[in-house]
Image: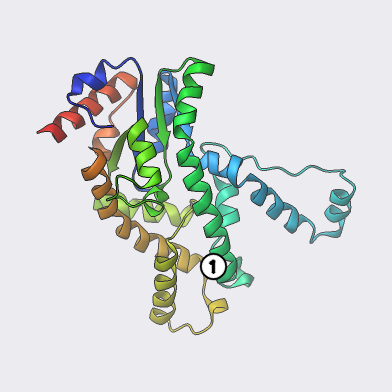
Amino acid sequence: MLFSSADEFVKAPRRAVTVFGMAGVGKTRLSNMLRASKWFHYSADYRIGTRYMGEYIVDNFKHEAMKLPFLAELLRSDSIYISSNITFDNLDPLSTYLGRPGNPDKGGLPLEEYQRRQEQHRVAEIAALRDVPHFIERAQSLYNYDDFITDTGGSLIEVIDQTDPNDEVVKTLAASTALLYIRGTGKDAAELVRRFKQSPKPIYYRPEFLVAKWAEYKLINGIVEDHDVDPAGFGAWGFEALMHDRLPRYQALADNFGYVVEASDLATVRDGDEFIDLMAAAIEKRMR
């Protein structure tokens, strides 16, 4: 959804924006703020973790609980109930399920099991993003929201072809929303890596990228067997490699189909009106 002028966006009776960029760059902060300004907040990661992967997540909890005889007996007799308390701001249940590959004694998953869960996430993310037009209409008809923001995960760029207007996800999002890239700096990237090490977020790798980086990490560290890989070490190293690989593809998506705002400028936005002004400036910049 590209506009012929900034006024076309500013004066529109209904607005819909999809924000994308690095995990932790400010997408959810913006979405939470806009929710207070009467924008409907659609979190793709929340949709993934509830509608499309909720059963996988809860079954994994139950699998771990069944290892304890006391809890196993209570589960068999339906005496206890286990559920996921995933929220927009707490995606730990999804992160825990996706896990990290490596040494099982250090909490890692066998590579094949990790790849299986990655594929589940790919399918779920595509489905969640294709749900956006339905939720735009639902937000208006059910809750009377005219403005709508799609808060995407950092892995949006992994499940699309950012150059193809007929890609099923690109076509869906571009037809129903304005695509907005929140662009960070090298300093932002370093801070995101530091924060990821402290509190990992859900992470998805393209299959071929994962295989290549897995082999590269083992080679660099002189590791022969998959089960000797430190999952925390690979997780942080892989996230940094993935983040730098994504940056030019985020830019290409914005160049082809959307707009760009700097993360530093977004950090100064305090409400919906200021966001509309920032979006208008991005539209004018593209037109120039």
Res 63 visible: yes
Secondary structure of the residue carrying tag 1 is: loop
Q: Which residue is mark 1?
A: 101
User: With 111 as the anchor, is 85 left or right in this view?
Assistant: right
Q: Is residue 188 left or right of residue 91?
A: left
The residue at 31%/36% (across/down) is 179
Is 164 placed above or below 261 here? Answer: below
Structural crowding at the residue carrying mark 1, measured as other residues with C-alpha within 10 Å and reported as few (<14), some (14–19) or many (≥20): many
Residue at the location (41% across, 25% down)? 148
Residue nearest the viewer, comparing 86 with 1 = 1
- Residue 72, image x and y in percent? 84, 55
Snapshot quadrant of residue 147 = top left
Residue drawn at point x = 29 percent, y = 41 percent:
181
- Residue 208 in picture, x, y percent from top left: 41, 68
Residue 231 higher or lower than 288, as above or below: below
Numbered disc total: 1
Q: Quadrant of the N terminus?
A: top left
- Looking at the figure, which quarter contains the C terminus? top left
Does any portion of residue 90 appear in the rendered image?
A: no
- What percent of the width, then of the height, locates residue 224? 49, 85
The amino acid sitting under disc 1 is Pro
Image coordinates for residue 5, horizontal then vertical, percent: 17, 24
Q: Residue at x 36, y 27 (%)?
A: 16
Q: Where, by quadrant of the figure, is residue 96 drawn? A: bottom right
